[in-house]
Image: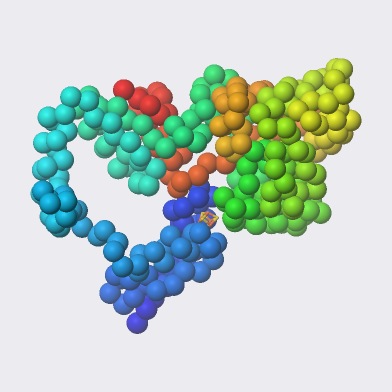
Amino acid sequence: MPKDVTDVICPFCGTLCDDLIITVSDDNKTILGVKNACAIGAEKFNHQRQPGRVKRPRMRQADGSYKEITYDEAIDWTAKMLVKSRKTLMYGWASTSCQAMSIGHEIAEKVGAIVDNCATVCHGSSLIAIEDVGVPSCTLGEVKNRADRVIFWGCNPAHAHPRHMSRYSIFPRGFFTAKGHKGRKIYCVDCRYTDTAKVADGFIQVQQGFDYELLDAFRTAARGEALPDTVGGVPKEKIIEVVEDLKSGRFGIIFFGMGLTHTMGRNHNIDIAINFTRDMNDYTKFAIMAMRGHWNVTGSGQVLGWQYGFPYAVD
Ligand code: SF4
């Protein structure tokens, strides 16, 4: 008889939905169905049934074909390769557990390897900024239960984190927040009108590459100082209106994505966003959080951080 496994965590986008129900075959070998996941999360599980999936270690042969080998053979070959190598790059890590990472890092230390993870090409610049200036952040549970001002800056969760808005940031009723837009004011800052912008109360279209200048203008407006007529294509009246509305909220949160981390300014975009968050705490409670992706990439940074003091690119 097929059976349901409940409270399964989805290993895809970093929203880490933990309410999935996975139906498995009697022998536990085949995933037969997925409930509660979004389309991309469901696809991750259903992919298990696809033909051609690599289930055992394989060794490339001289003619270019692959031959299945045992785990013992694979481990033996890899250990010898690591010992013989002059400099190994051990890259990736985001698709495995924190425990596996910590053991992998110890191996890297023994063989003198460089360890790096996918943050190099996504939120690594956020981590540099956080090391530089700290980060006033919170949990997603606090966002769900308390946030009445939500800003999505340079991110598009409607596509990249599909259940983020329904689980935490826009639609759920929280302990201190009403359901949906009644209890929250949503802003989207982006250079494009995205599907996330469509569900926001306010869309602020920033000229591409001018996020730093606009965040600087937000800080200036928060202090009540003079602004030029437009900054990054946004009129000063709009900047003042948004900042005053943010100040009037009880709990604000900035979610930021790669529109900030991988545009001109990179880590400096993040450190000024963090400093704006800090400024806003003079008026109300405010927090900031990266829209991380790729399952456990956050775990990789955390484990490298507690083992070696740096979250990525460790030699
Ligand atoms: S929102 Fe993300 S974590 Fe949740 S089900 Fe979809 S892909 Fe998985």
Q: Quadrant of residue 281?
A: top right
Residue 57's spot in the image, x, y percent?
Answer: 19, 53
Of residues 228 and 36, the one drawn nearer to the viewer in this rendering? 228
Q: Quadrant of residue 85?
A: top left
- Image point (35%, 39%), residue name: 92
User: Where's the C terminus, which quadrant?
Assistant: top left
Q: Is residue 248 visible?
A: no
Would residue 110 be found to the left or right of residue 25 on screen? left
Q: Is residue 78 above or below residue 269?
A: below
List the single residue furthest toward the front: 63
- Image point (76%, 49%), residue name: 200
Of residues 142 and 29, the one drawn nearer to the viewer in this rendering? 29
Q: Quadrant of residue 230?
A: top right
- Image point (35%, 28%), residue name: 307
Would residue 94 be found to the left or right of residue 315 on screen? right
Residue 255's spot in the image, x, y percent?
Answer: 64, 39
Q: Is residue 79 visible?
A: yes
Residue 227's spot in the image, x, y percent?
Answer: 85, 20
List the single residue furthest toward the bottom: 1
